[in-house]
Amino acid sequence: MRRIRKERGLTQDALHDVSGVHRNHLSAIERGALNPSYQTMLRVADALEVPLSKLVAMSEELDKLRP
C-alpha cells in the first residue's frame, strides 16, 4: 500500500483526506501492525484507484518475505 501511495504522490494525510481512514490507522496498516477490515481496505483501494485484489496480492507477497 505504501508503494502505491508514494507512486501516486500522496502523503498519509492526503490519503486520509481521500479515503476517510485515519492517518494513524493508515500508518499501522502500512507497517503491518494492524489487519484492516474489508471495508477499510475497500476505502483505501478506491482512494488509491486500484482494485482491492491488487492490495491483497501485494500484502500476500510481503507476508511471504516476512520471517
Image (cartoon, helix red, strand yellow):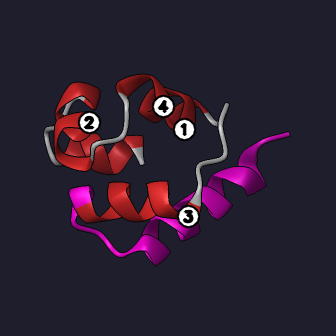
Cα separation, mark 3 vs mark 4, equals 14 Å
Query: How far is mark 2 from mark 4, CA to CA?
Result: 9 Å
**Callout 3 touching callout 1 (CB < 8 Å):** no
Name the amino acid, label 1.
Ile
Disc 2 marks a residue whose amino acid type is His
Q: Earlier in the sequence, mark 2 or mark 4?
A: 2
Query: Which residue bears the numbered disc 1?
Result: 29
- Left/right placement of residue 23 relative to residue 61 reads left
Q: Residues within 10 Å of mark 1 (few under 14, many from 20)?
A: some
Q: Mark 4 points at which residue?
A: 25
Foreground of the two, 46 or 61:
46
Dot 3 or dot 2, earlier in sequence:
2
Residue at screen point 66% across, 62% down: 60
Q: Which of marks 1 and 2 is in front?
A: 2
- Residue 64: x percent and y percent? 76, 56
Mark 4 is surrounded, within 10 Å at the Cα level, by few (under 14), some (14 to 19) or many (20 or more) other residues, namely some
> Which residue corresponds to mark 2?
16
Identify the magenta region: 47-67
Provide the residue designation for mark 3: 38
Q: What element carries label 1?
A: helix
Amino acid at dot 4: His
> Pointer 2: residues within 10 angstroms few (<14), some, or many (20+)?
some
Distance from label 3 to label 1 (Cα)? 12 Å
